[in-house]
């Protein structure tokens, strides 16, 4: 399947995309994860993206497009879930055209619906494993006891002020894409409130309905 998982910061896109990868064998393509790895390794891309990611602004379309293009090509244009891409009208239009050129249209854009107060709580309590990138939540999905607590860190863009900016950027630049995909009849909305497994089961139900014939 070819999917986009869509929603505001903290909606659970990464969590659900990783479950889709584990259970359905659909590769997660997270532009945020790729950018954070580039920052960590101080590659030329990381150096260009650093100030944007750390302040919660969007990295310029041109830089992120190359990442998406490469990652989708690496998957042979099939069996991927885009997490965090597209985020602007320009990115969405490019993606539609690119996938059309490869006769690989999206099967669905899964939109996770979560109110702001829940998003802020999730982001303030999120923690990341510094080496593996595994995501935890101090209340709902705590790190296992055998994990070294010194390796459990907070993402720098999860500071309250940066979270406010990321939510504002989402409302301004990304949320309007819901109507774009609605017009393409690709958008499926899923209630993102509930535990991780409940949300996953809701996604499974809507994907069952969008499954392509073999
Ligand atoms: P990115 O990494 O994509 O961040 P984001 O979209 O802001 O999303 P998050 O990763 O914060 O949240 P999520 O929805 O994945 O939630 P998660 O599953 O972790 O992007 C970071 C930055 O990179 C951007 O700000 C930008 O600078 C740049 N960037 C990336 N893509 C770009 C693009 N296309 N164009 C331009 N710039 C780009 O869950 C959050 C927390 O909640 C976790 O602790 C989790 O354990 C917990 N949780 C999840 N689900 C549940 C549940 N059901 N119940 C309880 N807790 C839950």
Image (tube, helix red, strand yellow):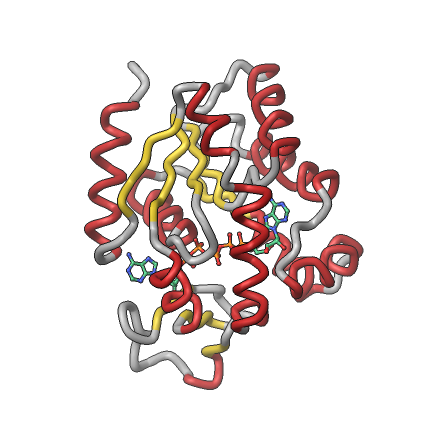
Foreground of the two, 46 or 168: 168
Q: Quadrant of the N terminus?
A: top left
| Residue 36 rendering spot, x and y as whole percentages | 61, 60
Q: Is residue 147 left or right of residue 200?
A: right
- Whether 46 is drawn above or below 29: the answer is below
Report whether 137 appears left or right of 183: left
Residue 85 percent coordinates (x, y): 55, 40
Question: On screen, 193 above or below 74?
Answer: below
Res 42 → quadrant: bottom right
Q: Residue at x 50, y 75 (%)?
A: 154
Q: For residue 149, which quarter of the picture?
A: bottom left
Asked if one can make out residue 143 in the rendered structure from this viewpoint, the answer is: no
- The residue at 66%/31% (across/down) is 90
Q: Is residue 154 left or right of residue 142?
A: right
Residue 74 appears in the picture as rendered: yes
Image location of residue 76, percent across then percent down: 53, 27
Quarter of the image that includes the C terminus: top left
Q: Is residue 13 above or below residue 129?
A: above
Query: Residue 147: horizontal and vertical position, in percent?
Result: 37, 79
Along the line of sight, the residue nearer the viewer: 112 or 129: 112
Residue at the (41%, 70%) spot, across then down: 126
Q: As displayed, is residue 36 above or below residue 170?
A: below
Q: Residue, x 66% and y 64% (percent of image)? A: 55
């Amino acid at each position: 399947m070819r999917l986009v998982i869509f929603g505001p910061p903290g909606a659970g896109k990464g969590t659900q995309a990783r479950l889709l990868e584990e259970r359905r064998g659909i590769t997660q393509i997270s532009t945020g994860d790729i950018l954070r790895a580039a920052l960590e390794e101080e590659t030329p891309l990381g150096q260009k993206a650093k100030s944007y990611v750390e302040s919660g602004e969007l990295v310029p379309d041109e830089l992120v497009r190359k990442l998406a293009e490469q990652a989708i090509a690496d998957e042979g244009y099939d069996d991927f879930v885009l997490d965090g891409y597209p985020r602007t009208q320009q990115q969405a239009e490019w993606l539609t055209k690119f996938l059309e050129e490869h006769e690989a249209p999206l099967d669905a854009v899964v939109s996770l619906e979560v109110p702001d107060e829940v998003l802020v709580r999730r982001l303030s309590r999120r923690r990341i494993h510094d080496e593996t990138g595994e995501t935890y939540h101090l209340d709902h999905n705590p790190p296992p006891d055998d994990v070294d607590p010194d390796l459990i860190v907070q993402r720098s863009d999860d500071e309250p002020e940066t979270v406010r900016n990321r939510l504002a950027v989402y409302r301004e630049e990304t949320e309007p894409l819901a109507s774009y995909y609605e017009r393409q009849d690709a958008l499926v909305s899923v209630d993102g409130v509930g535990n991780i497994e409940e949300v996953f089961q809701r996604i499974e139900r809507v994907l069952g309905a969008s499954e392509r014939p073999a």
